[in-house]
Amino acid sequence: MSKVDSRYMEFSIGGQLYAIPLLSVKEVLPEPEITDVPNMPSHFEGMMNLRGQILGVFNVRKRLGAKARAADATNSEVVIVMEQAGVSVGMLVDEVTQVLNPDPDKVRPAPLKEDDQSKTYISSVIQTGEDLVLILDIVHLLELAKYKREINAA
């Protein structure tokens, strides 16, 4: 029986730490050229060309309603290219910070009420020292099922 890979890629947005399952990550890129697409939701940043594959790029900051980057931020944003629910997409984040391999007892359900909107996309929480890292359910956060239907219809 194979052991389940419970590692996560941790990243920051507006000073808050988030993470996604490492197995869904394909690569991390310095911010590529992104082409705007009119009449899309505000958190859809646009499209990018990744070695001939066209990917949608989502701005996770806008989707989460997180605070804006500091005006003096010296490093540019990065795109995490990932595949989830049969869809490859890019996620624009402030920076990738580390790979986490937490003890299973450090991963806890998010203490949110059932009617909290964020409960649909924050699946759990990891305590790393003094920090709390929110584990995101990207399928729900970015509405990938809806996105997949739209790109298949195109």
Image (tube, rainbow, N blue to C red):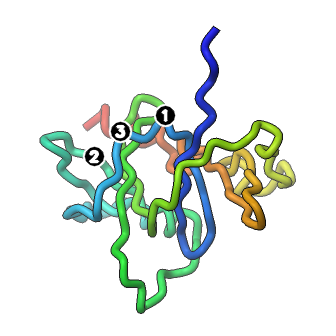
User: At 50% across and 50% down in the image, what residue appears?
Assistant: 142
Q: Quadrant of residue 64?
A: bottom right
- For disc 3, the marked residue is 88
Which circle's residue, 2 or 3, is located before the other in the chain? 2
- Expressed as whole percent of the image width and height from the top left, the position of residue 17 reads 61, 63
Label 2: which secondary element: strand
- Expressed as whole percent of the image width and height from the top left, the position of residue 148 reads 39, 36
- For disc 1, the marked residue is 23
Using the image, determine if residue 10 lies above or below residue 70: above
User: At 58% across and 73% down in the image, what residue appears?
Assistant: 66
Say what amino acid the circle numbered 2 marks. Answer: Leu
Assess disc 2: are there few (<14), some (14-19) or many (≥20) residues with their C-alpha within 10 Å of its C-alpha.
some
Q: Nearer the viewer, mark 1 or mark 2?
A: 1
Q: Are marks 2 and 3 in contact (CB under 8 Å)?
A: yes
> What is the quadrant of the C terminus in the image?
top left
Is 38 in front, or is 94?
A: 94
Label 3: which secondary element: strand
Which circle's residue, 1 or 2, is located before the other in the chain? 1
- For disc 2, the marked residue is 55
Q: CA distance from mark 1 to mark 2?
A: 18 Å
The residue most toward the top is 1
42 left or right, relative to 46:
right
Say what amino acid the circle numbered 1 marks. Answer: Leu
